[in-house]
Image (cartoon, grey):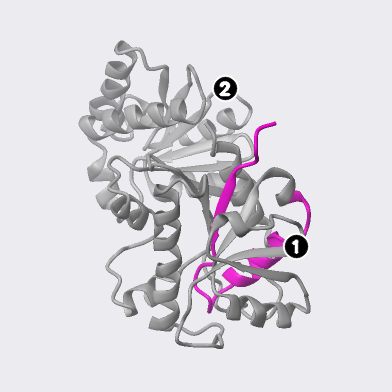
Amino acid sequence: MKQKPIIGITMGDPAGIGPEIVIKALAGREIYDKVRPLVIGNVDYLKQTMEILKMSLKINEVEKVEDCKFQCGILDVINIPCEEKRISFGKISPKTGRASFDYIKKSIEMGLSGLIDGVATAPINKEAIHAAGVDFIGHTEMYADLTSSKDVLTMFQVNNLRIFFLTRHMSLIEACNYITFDNVYKGIGLSHDALVSLGFNKPKLAVAALNPHGGEKGLFGYEEVREVTPAIAKANEEGIDVYGPVPADSVFHLAKIGRYDAVLSLYHDQGHIAAKTLDFEKTVSVTVGLPFVRTSVDHGTAFDIAGKGIASSISMEEAIKVAGEYAFI
């Protein structure tokens, strides 16, 4: 019988809700039925958080994967020490920012060594990361750079809907300017290849339109006519099953009901709004193009509720399950 995948779970910024949602996610049997979870974080912070939650899971601090128990009720933890022994919840700190980066580096080390089969990440805080002197915008950039991975792509998954993003963290006007023939054509190819790597033999991909009604052949803008449609045509000529540009007010629904396997969103909020409106808590971010699968919750550190014991772990649970789903593909 094939072993369940080992999924490393980084604890995120300790001052946020990361420790809480990791503990809550691993408190029940469901995760253990699907994967073998290994927390990469800090034992002291986990214990402090369990005091707040009034939970009494056992902690099995390990240095090697072979020493893990992988049993419900026991948290297997790779302990990464930190100077601060107690968490100051909800406060930006370079020390906790550095700690969250150290967890990520350890997960990359273990992933590249084949010690774990995938990674699910709890949220980090960009201000804390920058205060710690870490020169990365976010998780995706860290994993791409530190694994020397090119053409890394972000995919959102929520239920049956999958969304890729042509552009991510740039202003809307910059994103519009980025929508050129070459960039759209490349985005289609990367999205297609990503779907194949995730187990889709002949994926059907749709490209969302930028303008209302797909531009109405230039009536509401020329991006579709001049850039997007020709890129789709070239990709079709090369054997990629891609459709569009499909008006953005319908394409995500059509993908949800199964007409397409995924949608290429042209800008950040176009796809984010669709996914999060469908199911905010179950939206999972998948980083495709790394040597191992990496998933993440699609929410932040929530400093306003950190340490209060009221954070939902649903997104963390989904991220772990999706990492397990794609780990052996």
- Quadrant including the N terminus: top right
Amino acid found under the numbered disc labelled 2: Arg
Q: Is residue 46 left or right of residue 57?
A: left
15 inside magenta stretch: yes
State the separation of the CA atoms marked 1 and 2. 37 Å
11 inside magenta stretch: yes
Query: Which residue: 56% across, 88% down?
Result: 86
Q: Nearer the viewer, residue 24 or 231?
A: 24
Against 243, residue 135 (above or below) is below
Say the numbered circle drawn on residue 27: 1
| Rendered location of residue 167, percent (x, y) | 33, 45
Q: Secondary structure at mark 1?
A: loop
Q: Nearer the viewer, residue 198 or 252?
A: 198
Q: Quadrant of residue 34?
A: top right
Q: Nearer the viewer, residue 195 or 50?
A: 50
| Rendered location of residue 264, percent (x, y) | 42, 34
Against 235, residue 76 (above or below) is below
Query: Which residue: 28% across, 53% down?
Result: 145
Are there few (<14), some (14-19), or many (20+) residues within 10 Å of tag 2?
some
Amino acid found under the numbered disc labelled 1: Ala
| Rendered location of residue 7, percent (x, y) | 57, 50
| Rendered location of residue 245, percent (x, y) | 39, 26
The residue range painted magenta reads 1-30
Q: Going from the N terminus, do you reach mark 1 or mark 2 first? A: 1
Q: Which residue is mark 2?
A: 259
Query: Which residue: 30% across, 28% down?
Result: 228
